[in-house]
Image: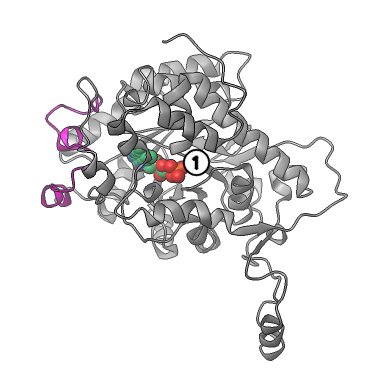
Amino acid sequence: MQALKPIPPHIVNLADHEAAAREALDDNAWAYFAGGAADELTLRANVSAWQGLQLLPRVLQPLQAGHSQVQLLGRTLAHPVLLAPVAYQRMAHPDGELATALAAAAQGAGLVLSTQASTPLEDVAHAYHRMASDPASDSPGPLWFQLYLQPRRDTTLQLLARAEAAGFEAIVLTVDAPVHGARDRERRAGFRLPPGIRAVNLPATDSCSTTPPGDASTIGGLLQHSPTWADVRWLVQTTRLPVLLKGILHPDDARQALDVGVAGVIVSNHGGRTLDTCLPTAHALPAVAQAVGAHMAVLADGGIRRGTDVFKALDMGAHAVLVGKPYVYGLAHAGAVGVAHVIRLLRDEFDIALALCGCASPADIRPAHLVSEKQYPPTSNAIHSHLKYSNQPSACTPLNPHHRAPSAAQLSQ
Ligand SMILES: Cc1cc2nc3c(=O)[nH]c(=O)nc-3n(C[C@H](O)[C@H](O)[C@H](O)COP(=O)(O)O)c2cc1C
């Protein structure tokens, strides 16, 4: 591991980490880590969709004994922020996924390791568990393994067996990337994986390990291996670990996931890196949460950059959230300390948002804390339509009036 450096005092939020990462990374790595698909409209919309939701705080609430703990798949987490799977982290920093694992465990954040990690999955699990058992660490979050189904079923089975043996607690099957997105930014930069960086947990001959992430020319080949619901059923029956699906936007897909025995869904559009112009996750989340949130874990990622975004996601029915780019930016310029700082900033901002909205804990978050920019204050048009259609929601009705914060019993299935 490289020597740890303190974070410069001018870095006070996630945007500051992004700027520092831009300085630290070369154009090749920057195109990969910062880029999205095509015109990057979804990449930007993910961020602005959270920003466009406005909070309606309550005052004079009892905040004593407040905390940010949440329940997820039978576990109590210190806070609701997990680190999303991000491939090839040794391209961002020589310590790569090991630094990320140490930081996540120290900060009590769950970690989802990518199939395309550039560090052996056993080493990452070992680092995570060692740090999590340190008395100075926060109570540990879950360690999950993200799976891309492999062209050969025996490769998938070997990956599953290794992940189970190493102590990963769930399998996250990514379903929104049967092919690479059209990555204009990567193609312009002539993106190539640097020598020595590869998906080390996959056989070198496997297409997923050798295909450069920006290469969309392999569509025909990759489509032959794109997962279907039959594969999800097979996976649920094959692994002894709970399975979550990552990349769900449509409530009907979430319902189908429930039907085939999946333990949770992650509302995600791959951070805007696959299908450009698809729905931002802040807009997709309420319908998915409403459809299945009482029966399975619902998480969301994409564009979460502030503690208030975390609050809004929980308000709209997520049980926890994930961040991708922000922690890789921390990693890029400051290794493990940078990742830990990013998580700490989000946690602190989330705690502040809770208190300022009048919530002693995430369980106190209510739909009434969130209104959309367009709904409040009521305009004369809105009042008119409200009078005309008096059975419709009023101008300042919360966005998801049917959503109720899930009970601990609901989440501990
Ligand atoms: C550089 C990069 C690599 C990624 N690699 C993977 C991956 O290997 N598997 C996966 O399921 N998602 C991958 N993702 C998507 C993230 O898991 C997550 O959905 C997304 O980054 C969330 O959006 P955010 O970056 O705005 O927080 C990657 C994202 C980035 C930025």
In the rendered image, which quarter contains the N terminus?
top left
User: Does residue 203 show up magenta in the picture?
Assistant: yes
Residue placed under numbered mark 1 in the picture: 322
**Residue lying at the far bottom of the rendered structure:** 388
Tell me residue 29's x, y (percent).
Answer: 31, 31
Image vertical order of residue 304 relative to residue 163, above or below: below
Q: Quadrant of residue 306?
A: top right
Tally of numbered discs = 1
Residue sitting nearer the eye, 341 or 190: 190
Residue sitting nearer the eye, 3 or 145: 3
169 relative position to 230: left or right: right
Residue 142 shows in this picture: no
* Stretch of the chain drawn in magenta: 198-223
Residue sitting nearer the eye, 26 or 136: 26
Q: Secondary structure at mark 1?
A: strand
Tell me residue 122's x, y (percent).
Answer: 35, 19
Q: Amino acid at mark 1?
A: Leu
* The image quadrant in which ligand 1 is located: top left
Tell me residue 44's x, y (percent).
Answer: 44, 52
Q: Is mark 1 within 8 Å of ligand 1?
A: yes
Question: Measuring 71% from the left and 56% from the top, which residue is drawn there?
Answer: 366
Question: Measuring 63% from the left and 62% from the top, which residue is drawn there?
Answer: 403
Tell me residue 268's x, y (percent).
Answer: 42, 51
Residue 58 shows in this picture: yes
